[in-house]
Image (tube, helix red, strand yellow):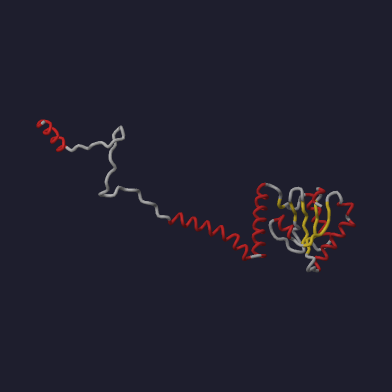
């Protein structure tokens, strides 16, 4: 219906638990599609939807059932009646206000709306996962969180290694000369003895 570039007027009802109001809204849409078809055929398509899951994802909220909503599928916009729809005259007044622009247009396909819709879908997916399989969902989301916490804890509590210092009493490495041979360290007294030995010679 949205591919025809027309506004889509829907009665959102709960077919599993139909109420008197749900039946009335469906009847109003059937009346519009037959008796007012020629008047609105270029602007509207009429129908009803069982359940509100799709509409909730579109408006990023929850639509009460039953309710009337007009969708602009080309821009992902929607309009909701400001007052309760009781009669066919109320519904006609609402549809005409959408056409003349006096009804408030909500939603849209801007960047901010896309970001909000993505967050809403992610949130809805997580909530549905926990509702369907709570233990498995806890494991899926808890495992990476636990690993990250352990890594952060290990990083914060790690003791830094002390800088290496020479140990007292340790033998120093020998000094090498330019040819790689050990340089002879001469003490002052040994020099004197060598001079005396030369005089004796």
Specify whether 30 is left or right of 150. right
Q: Name which quarter of the figure residue 47 lies in.
A: bottom right
User: Residue at 14% of width from left, 38% of height from top?
Assistant: 189
Percent position (x, y) of residue 75? 74, 48
User: Residue at 71% of width from left, 49% of height from top?
Assistant: 108
Say which of 21 and 186 sits in front: 186
Residue lying farthest to the left in this orientation: 200
Percent position (x, y) of residue 145? 55, 58
Q: Is residue 26 above or below residue 38?
A: below
Specify whether 173 is left or right of 69. left
Say which of 56 and 140 sits in front: 140
Q: Name which quarter of the figure residue 27 lies in.
A: bottom right
Say which of 186 and 10 sits in front: 186
Percent position (x, y) of residue 133? 65, 65
Q: Is residue 22 above or below residue 175?
A: below
Percent position (x, y) of residue 13? 78, 63
Please state, as top left, top right, bottom left or bottom right, where the C terminus lies in the image: top left
How many circles with numbers are drawn on the protein?
A: 0
Residue lying farthest to the front in this orientation: 201
Specify whether 131 is left or right of 144. right
User: Residue at 86% of width from left, 60% of height from top?
Assistant: 30
């Amino acid at each position: 219906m949205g591919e025809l570039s027309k506004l889509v007027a829907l009665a959102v009802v709960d077919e599993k638990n139909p109420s008197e109001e749900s039946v009335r809204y469906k009847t109003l849409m059937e009346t519009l599609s037959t008796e007012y078809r020629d008047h609105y055929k270029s602007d509207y398509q009429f129908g009803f939807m069982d359940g509100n899951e799709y509409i909730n994802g579109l408006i990023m909220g929850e639509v009460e059932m039953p309710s009337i909503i007009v969708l602009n599928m080309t821009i992902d916009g929607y309009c909701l009646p400001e007052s309760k729809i009781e009669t066919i005259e109320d519904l006609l007044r609402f549809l005409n206000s959408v056409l003349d622009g006096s009804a408030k247009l909500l939603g849209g396909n801007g960047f901010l709306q896309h970001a909000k819709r993505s967050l809403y879908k992610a949130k809805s997916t997580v909530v549905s996962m926990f509702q369907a399989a709570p233990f498995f969902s806890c494991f899926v989301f808890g495992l990476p969180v636990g690993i990250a916490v352990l890594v952060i804890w290990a990083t914060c509590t790690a003791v830094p290694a002390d800088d290496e210092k020479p140990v007292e009493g340790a033998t120093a490495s020998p000094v090498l000369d330019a040819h790689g041979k050990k340089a002879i360290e001469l003490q002052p007294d040994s020099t004197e003895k060598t001079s005396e030995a030369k005089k004796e010679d």
